[in-house]
Image (cartoon, coloured by chain):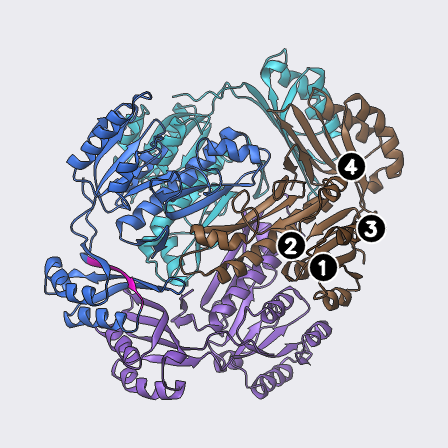
Chain colours: A cyan, B purple, C blue, D brown
Amino acid sequence: MSNVPQSHYYRLVVSCPDQVGIVARVSSFIAQQGGSITEASQHSDLETGRFFMRYEILAESLGITAQALREGFAPIAQAFNMQWALTDTKRLPRVVLMVSKESHCLVDLLYRWQAGELACDIVGVISNHSDMCALTEWYGIPYYHIPVDPQDKQPAFDAVEAQIETLDTDCVVLARYMQILPPALCQRYRGRVINIHHSFLPSFAGAKPYHQAYERGVKLIGATCHYVTEELDAGPIIEQDIHRVSHCHTPTDLVRFGRDVEKAVLARGLRWHLEDRVIIHGNKTVVFS
Amino acid sequence: MSNVPQSHYYRLVVSCPDQVGIVARVSSFIAQQGGSITEASQHSDLETGRFFMRYEILAESLGITAQALREGFAPIAQAFNMQWALTDTKRLPRVVLMVSKESHCLVDLLYRWQAGELACDIVGVISNHSDMCALTEWYGIPYYHIPVDPQDKQPAFDAVEAQIETLDTDCVVLARYMQILPPALCQRYRGRVINIHHSFLPSFAGAKPYHQAYERGVKLIGATCHYVTEELDAGPIIEQDIHRVSHCHTPTDLVRFGRDVEKAVLARGLRWHLEDRVIIHGNKTVVFS
Amino acid sequence: MSNVPQSHYYRLVVSCPDQVGIVARVSSFIAQQGGSITEASQHSDLETGRFFMRYEILAESLGITAQALREGFAPIAQAFNMQWALTDTKRLPRVVLMVSKESHCLVDLLYRWQAGELACDIVGVISNHSDMCALTEWYGIPYYHIPVDPQDKQPAFDAVEAQIETLDTDCVVLARYMQILPPALCQRYRGRVINIHHSFLPSFAGAKPYHQAYERGVKLIGATCHYVTEELDAGPIIEQDIHRVSHCHTPTDLVRFGRDVEKAVLARGLRWHLEDRVIIHGNKTVVFS
Amino acid sequence: MSNVPQSHYYRLVVSCPDQVGIVARVSSFIAQQGGSITEASQHSDLETGRFFMRYEILAESLGITAQALREGFAPIAQAFNMQWALTDTKRLPRVVLMVSKESHCLVDLLYRWQAGELACDIVGVISNHSDMCALTEWYGIPYYHIPVDPQDKQPAFDAVEAQIETLDTDCVVLARYMQILPPALCQRYRGRVINIHHSFLPSFAGAKPYHQAYERGVKLIGATCHYVTEELDAGPIIEQDIHRVSHCHTPTDLVRFGRDVEKAVLARGLRWHLEDRVIIHGNKTVVFS
């Protein structure tokens, strides 16, 4: 169930109030350890005065562990009032996929994961239906069938939350789960639940977006990968893409085109999240893709 | 002020309730006249049971005038309960452009018109400002400066309508006019007033769409070319396109990218309208592009 | 192994020298049988004077079988010197997929086929390796492992041809087969063997196109779906698409992006072929998509 | 003739052999001067072991002139064996545009320049024809008509080179000049002459690329912005883009679509060049867009 990247990196991700000298201080610290930075990204948001950076550091160029590096870095982080994380690519994020009956996103993610495109452990698939069980287990992944009673959904969501907890989950992916998670769950896993919405948000939030798009007569349909928040379809957007349509196309065609867009957008968004390329900034994202 | 296409065509555009035999009847009529059909497009809308077609017929292959062809076709049109038009490409549509202070769409349309990409006469430019006068007159086109009093707009709109009337206008293009036309004018020129909206509708209708898009943190911005109706930004969509943006981009960047999308989308939409490629169908369009 | 479309259609596909009256004659014939045309496409190639058309006719609107319709149509076809075919959507094309070790196109096609996006029977997968056997058989499809001896390839190709023959194959898809088929096989199945080439042809024909693209420093990579002819990577192009790349991307990234483009382009090209939307015209194609 | 950006920046652009400590040394130097870095980009090319960086530094945050900053930085540059430049956005690059009879790129660039999208002085337009004179002079820019004798081109190219020299030119843009510059001129202005080629290179190098594309039956056409080298159409690529085409489109349509792609690609490429975002790396480019 593992996809270890070929090289071993530490990733430092920082956001803090912007000021002169941040890069100098951070890069000097890394250089003093002999750290070789293989990828560096920075962004200064001029409107909010906030600074963002992400460094990918070759682990073998440093003589120390991730934990030692964290301890050395902590005083700098404190001095600049940073929100920060230093991750070790040897420790793969633990991902839970949640699906309903639509299989295209699940099939796509499992294939990409097996092909080594997604650096994570997929520790389980949770579904309110049993349809995707055989496929999931073919990949050697445990399947948790937790039916949702439309009259009383909370027990199911409690079971979902317990299962996510039990699996020691870093990231939950709603790969067309089609159920609205309760606010408490959204809050608890804030910034760690990724959804694919099958419209070009903010157009056509809510149910049956392809039918809404068809009714409005748009000439492009889209999909949106975003973090889940308490407010439906309104969380920070990670990635979007579109597909051209015309008067020839029925709602069925839109659904078919949309499947391809959804797969692509979710796969990109998740990959970036897993590689610590996405930083939430208010209700927006900085994406160092 | 003219752009005559090199070949001479009649264009037959039809919409009617679908039934067996329409194409047979129409194409047999054209064939009996010896008409050579150089382009043919058809569409059956299965949901509404409506049929649409557009034929481009080489005029020289027929022995008769457009008017004679119309007279011959009228009984067929009546038998099938058609809405229809037969246009002659020698008779160029008379177009009025309306602008405010933003010049990019005007500059683009005038250039394309001069380059022969838009088969029309541009008979005048109407603006609530005088900024674009020199440019317009450089192209030999009359400029009508009709200021709009924010406290009392109706007199200006009356003058606009009178000018459009005087110019015997077939089509009005709101090339970033930035004023909302009164309902009466919208109704009178229904299906003949084309607007470019600087967002991917239905997202961000109304004012300052790029700033709305920036605030929402979308990853794609867009533009929409549509027919104007009484309801703001809600008319039938002709064409849309998008441009990718990221956290790096300020609202100023979005405006800059947007200019290119607006120009492209408006130019395509107008070209299709002028070539009788757009048929309104309820609040949607059939576009035989 | 079947994907029967929900409605039952006959598809008439024609190419012939252009002249006045073709559409009238064909559409009148269909109308006389009471045939309801649900989709109609036509194209006149002005350079070569050739005419192309494709009709989709609702079978239940006709009182007769496909074979009776063919017999009735034959005199018309002869009068206009047509190349033509009338297919019945109840008779699914029999498709053989050929693969090597790269799985992405195979996985994608099998999934789309199972999801009902490809109206065909997949009657077998032929490979020079055994890697894809388990996956193929999971879908209930026979797998034929025919190793190719690099020193003497002809025996393998003879076995391949025999297997294709035995399976009564309508269409062969080289889904990253990575072997060059012998000319005799290309000729025998002319217009029925579809390849996906992993470059934007005619750029980077031949081996290792992503590495060629990387060396040249292009900013877009692509993929091309085309019919196979005796001349390598030079057959009629059905579909192409691209993906943006930058200096950040290694050849490995290009290969990864390319997989997505290849999948999409091959799936579209094959779907159009299976729906009789592609007509070969010299070394080009007319695609009524 | 000037477009001064609203803020005043120094831009530091560096390429050098990669090693630990470059960013630390450079950013510490900037920080010691109190320099506020508003945009930072870095790239390590793992294949060649070369490092690239670009900093945009707010001039007012430094107490010193560009020249003083250069002097302070020189020892660092030497220590790391850097190729480098420090530019001052108050000193606008001096650009010469060269055109033939096709006007679309010239019109587009002049408009963007006037609209403030291109931070440069356009100091002259050179053409082998007189067609674009009126337009150029309408923008207040000198027009140099230097006819090229097809039997003996060198005198014209000598005059062109002299004019470029006289105008103290930083950058030459071949905005559809349609003449092949002599090798000596290419060498002398290496990395400073930008061309727009009307194909998706390396496909269809040389003459009449749209007709070549039409003959090959491609489904996408493109344009390529690249630096000019002695080898025709083979220099480092800055930017490319494409437009979808089909069997419906004649070579004339391809030329028309191509104009839009050419304009967009050249404008982006030139803007990036003028903002010091493009670094040549062998026969490829690093583009910090």
Count of marks, rendered view:
4
Q: Residues within 10 Å of mark 2 (few under 14, many from 20)?
A: some
Q: In which quarter of the image is residue A279?
A: top right
Q: Is the magenta stretch mostly helix, strand or loop?
A: strand
Query: Which amino acid, mark 3?
Result: Ala
Q: In this view, does D136 lie above or below B125?
A: above
Between B112 and B203, the one lying in front of the other is B112
Residues behind callouts 2 and 4 on a single chain: yes
Considering only order in the chain, which callout, 2 or 3, is on the residue closer to the N terminus? 3
Magenta-drawn stretch contains B213: no
Task: Give the SS element for disc 1.
Answer: loop
For the residue carrying disc 1, how many other residues have a C-alpha within 10 Å: few (<14), some (14-19), or many (20+)? Answer: many
Q: Of the residues tagged 3 and 4, which is closer to the observer? A: 3
The residue wearing badge 4 is D36
Query: Do the CB atoms of the residues marked 3 and 2 lie less than 8 Å apart?
Result: no
Instruction: Mark yes or no: residue D63 visible.
Output: no
Q: Name the residue under label 3.
A: D162
Q: Residue at x 40, y 31 (%)?
A: A112
Dot 4: what SS? strand
Looking at the image, do the residues carrying marks 3 and 4 touch, with CB atoms under 8 Å apart?
Answer: no
Residue at which label 1 appears: D128
Of the numbered discs 1 and 2, the one sitting upstream in the chain is: 1
C12 in magenta = yes
- What is the chain letter for disc 2? D
